[in-house]
Amino acid sequence: MSLQPGERLGPYEVVAPIGAGAMGEVFRGRDTRLERDVAIKLVASELAGDPELVRRFEQEARAAGGLNHPNVLVVFDVGTHGGRPFLVSELLEGETLGTRLTRGALPPRKAVDAGAQVARGLAAAHAKGIVHRDLKPDNLFLTRDGQVKILDFGLAKLSEQPLAGPQDRTQLIPTRPGMVIGTPAYMSPEQVRGEEVDHRSDLFALGAILYEMLAGRRAFAGTTAAMVMAAVLREEPPELETPAGQVPPALGRLVRHCLEKDPAARVHSAHDLAFLLETLAGEWSTTSSRPVPPAAPSRRRLALAALAGSLLLACLLGGFAAGRAGRAGAGTPSYQRLTFRRGMLDAARFAPNGDIFYSAAWEGQPRAVFVRQAAAPDALPVALPAATSLLAVSPAGELAVALDCVEKAAGTCVGTLATAPVTGGTPRPLREGVQHADWAPDGGRLALVSDDGSRAHLELPAGKVLYETGGQITYPRISPAGDRIAFFEYPIRGDDRGWLAVVDLGGRKTVLAKNLEGGAQGLAWAPAGREVWFTAARATGQDRVLYAVDLSGRERGIAAVPGSLTLQDIARDGRLLLTLDTSRVSVHARPPGAANEHDLSWLDWSVLGDLSDDGSTVLFDEEGRAVGPNYALCLRRTDGSQLVRLGEGGAEALSPDGRWALTKLPREDARHQMLPTGAGAAREIPSHGLQLLPLAAWFPDGKHIAFVASEAGRAPAVWVQDLPAGTPRRVTPEGFAFPRSRPISPDGRFLFAGSGRTGYSVFPVGGGAARPLPIDSNQMKPVRWSADGRQIYVRNLALPLHVSLLDLASGRKTPWMEIASPDHAGERADLWLSADGKSYAYNVESNLGDLYLVAGLR
């Protein structure tokens, strides 16, 4: 023994030895300052000179020390004694789970409770970007009072997402491609293959531990490490049974869901797993044997909060319904809140048997599909790939989903249309580039909305176009009789103002509800098929309200609240699925030379239009409720200085000298205007009969602009116009537009633009052949040209933003920077970079929704 009782390591006094291992020794100690017992872990003397092992020891200290959670070992201090590193932590009384399992399986209730505690601890680590990578029974400690503590973060590694700040960063353990790290029986398949891992590897390990706690044997066994790893890669565990022979089916499915070979098919997060395990604990007991940590609200408090929220919504909706629909003799409506997590819920549908399916992106995780069964207390994830959005549920109980779904515009998520069983599994892809879909009553046909970048198409069945428009089509729903499709049409792409229409099977369109000026999202047919119910606002600044309109255009109000409603579905018995939504668009920027970002937003809907080349100034418009239907154009320095309101209009581009802001009022017939950023008068730019989209950019010489517009009856294209009153000249074929960005090269000779059919290309402004950009437009988009014009900055479509430099000569992409939104529920983002690529500004849109089941509205 290297330390003797009474020996001091700074303020810590050694009391007695606890144990020893290959890495070192552990002692009971006493913190003489705070008068508390502690554990002292001292690295073995023969290992103290090994830099790699010392680095692992320090890694454990930093990783665990950066966490503050009741299910993670608390680290108090680190230091060096006689050249040997030591770590001081809380003193635990009990045994490791590995020791406990030598005596056989745990009772199911205790196994589920222990698994839920571990999942909670992992959720805290994953939220900090820390992946454990060596979770196993020997690294889990069971205290005498029933708590579970996660130990040994010595193999922990940060995920690739940026953390909140420097204080959260942990020194990485260097690894090489192909290096296998972990303990074979609990390693995920991707770890066995030596691939990069993320939080889902920890979920696989926890699944293996759950299996062992319940069954009393390992999920993957073998006489050698190689045999165990082969089993992890290729074999499925034996059927899960406890020594008593009974495992509830839901628990068995959940454990197997954790042990999926494909990471995308596993439970999506530790937070989800903890919640599901806590729900399943009710199979055996309604009480917990361990104290509830003070930071976690009790189930009773959560229930009371949910009840209060439901009662408030019921009172508000009930009051409106009594005033508007009460004359039909309806009673007081009832409301049941179904979701309680933070994030965006984008679709919800009733299944024929009464189950409720919905897709949501919770806490910044990818979209996933969930099902809530009629008698279940909470929803369970459906085993589908990540980034899957629900589109519809057929009368026969089949799901229509969008795979690899990417949010593109208001109410629109674009992906690959596929069908899948309601129980999950491998989807069957049908069509790429689909935005919406709905099943016909016969369950054999699908109506869908596709978009080629220039025109939107409403098809029934797939391939037969019933209606098309140069604007946008959303929320198609087939009538109960199957003879009509109701939908929203937005004349301006990306703007959810428009009208509600129906089209029959012969392609004849009828507009039922006009002047939906403040947002139109969510519709469904009433069960009898005589009305279409929808949620929309009648003016900018108003919340979405629930309305009904019959086929002759007679309209009535049904329900309104202080907040925006979105109608998701109506069941055959008249019950509704409604979401209560809160949305915000914010502007964030990192000024030149700064280490941190500033929030430059004004009100609740600040939409970025441009960033100056030097990164010092942003141009944005405020589209929130307080400013009116024409928006407010604003200028603000990225250091957070007071904003300057320039006038009305949408933000489009800032001139190279910073003296002018290019803007356009949010109307179909509006023209471009140049508003001075200082003293001076506004100048209107003639449109020469073109219909302008809200996309424009300034040439570097300040004498020309590029913009996206369409001629009457034609698809949009990119045009160039001399200032102040030149004649526009088209420079791309129809169907091309540039993204919200800086599309023009530094010498003004080239610009990039994209088409939904062919992707992005570089076009010579003076004419000539286009050159395709070697990027997948479903995965990436260009941001701006490099200062030398030889490269283009490109980025991914989802948060966090990964920016790379694309070399035009070789096609090689080099990682440049990564940007993470402060709002983990943020869904969409637009990005601008300074000329040197070091400063940036971006928009992030966060849409938060709570799902309600509503009965009694008429």
Image: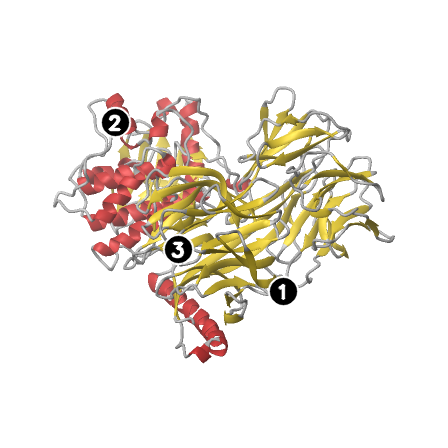
Quadrant in the picture for residue 52: top left
Work out how far the residue at label 2 is from the one at label 1, CA to CA, in angstroms.
Answer: 61 Å
Residue at 58% over, 59% down: 499
Q: With 509 as the anchor, is 211 left or right in this view?
A: left
Residue 231's disc number: 2
Q: Position of residue 456 (x, y in %)?
A: 57, 45
- Please state which amino acid type lies under the numbered disc 3: Arg
Q: Which residue is mark 1?
A: 539
Mark 1 or 3, nearer chain start: 3
Work out how far the residue at label 3 is from the one at label 2, CA to CA, in angstroms.
Answer: 39 Å
- Of residues 801 and 667, which is closer to you in this image? 667
- Of residues 56 and 521, which is closer to you in this image? 521
Are there few (<14), some (14-19), or many (20+) residues within 10 Å of tag 3? many
**Which quadrant of the rendered structure holds the N terminus?**
top left
Q: Position of residue 34 (x, y in %)?
A: 41, 50
Residue 100's disc number: none
Q: With 712 as the anchor, is 34 left or right in this view?
A: left
Quadrant in the picture for residue 365: top left
Quadrant in the picture for residue 610: top right
Q: Which residue is mark 3?
A: 349
Q: Position of residue 432 (x, y in %)?
A: 48, 37
Residue at 48% over, 41% down: 463
- Of residues 450 and 644, which is closer to you in this image? 450
Work out how far the residue at label 1 is from the one at label 3, CA to CA, in angstroms.
Answer: 28 Å
Label 1 near label 2: C-beta < 8 Å? no
Are there few (<14), some (14-19), or many (20+) residues within 10 Å of tag 1? some
Pick out the residue farthest to the right: 680
Q: Nearer the viewer, mark 3 or mark 2?
A: 3
Are there few (<14), some (14-19), or many (20+) residues within 10 Å of tag 2? some
- Please state which amino acid type lies under the numbered disc 2: Ala
